[in-house]
């Protein structure tokens, strides 16, 4: 798994972007209906834990979390 982090200064703070890439083998056709949702859920939950941990630590340091973080998190979880 590779993660690429980008930091961009904006008015009022910093936007942090993370892109995670994972290479894997193809899931066999018979197992795909059961495995694909599980694989997607685990990957999404892992990214959300990473973002939540980062927000918690930055909040302790700065005293408030950025609205940009919340907008990015909604992309993963939906409205």
Image: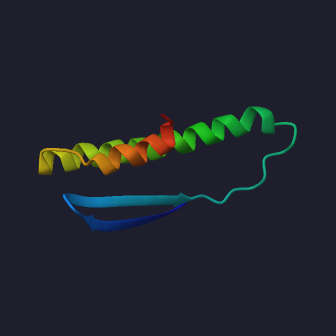
Which residue is depicted at the point 69% across and 56% down? 24
Q: Position of residue 28 (x, y in %)?
A: 84, 45
The front one of 72 and 59 is 72
Which residue is depicted at the point 79% across and 34% down? 33
Q: Position of residue 79 (x, y in %)?
A: 48, 34
Residue at the far right in the pictured view:
30
Which residue is depicted at the point 49% across and 37% down? 77
The front one of 15 and 45 is 15
Which residue is depicted at the point 50% across and 43% down? 76
Q: Is residue 46 left or right of residue 35?
A: left
Q: Position of residue 39 (x, y in %)?
A: 64, 41
Quadrant of residue 6 within the rendered picture: bottom left
Residue at the far front in the pictured view:
11
Q: How many numbered discs sit on the rendered protein? A: 0
Q: How is the image coloured?
A: rainbow
Q: Is residue 11 left or right of residue 4?
A: left
């Amino acid at each position: 798994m590779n993660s690429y982090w980008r930091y961009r200064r904006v008015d009022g703070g910093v936007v942090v972007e993370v892109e995670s890439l994972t290479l894997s083998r193809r899931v066999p056709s018979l197992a795909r209906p059961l495995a694909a949702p599980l694989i997607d859920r685990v990957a999404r939950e892992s990214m959300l834990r990473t973002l939540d941990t980062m927000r918690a630590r930055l909040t302790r340091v700065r005293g408030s979390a950025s609205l940009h973080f919340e907008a990015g998190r909604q992309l993963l979880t939906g409205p």
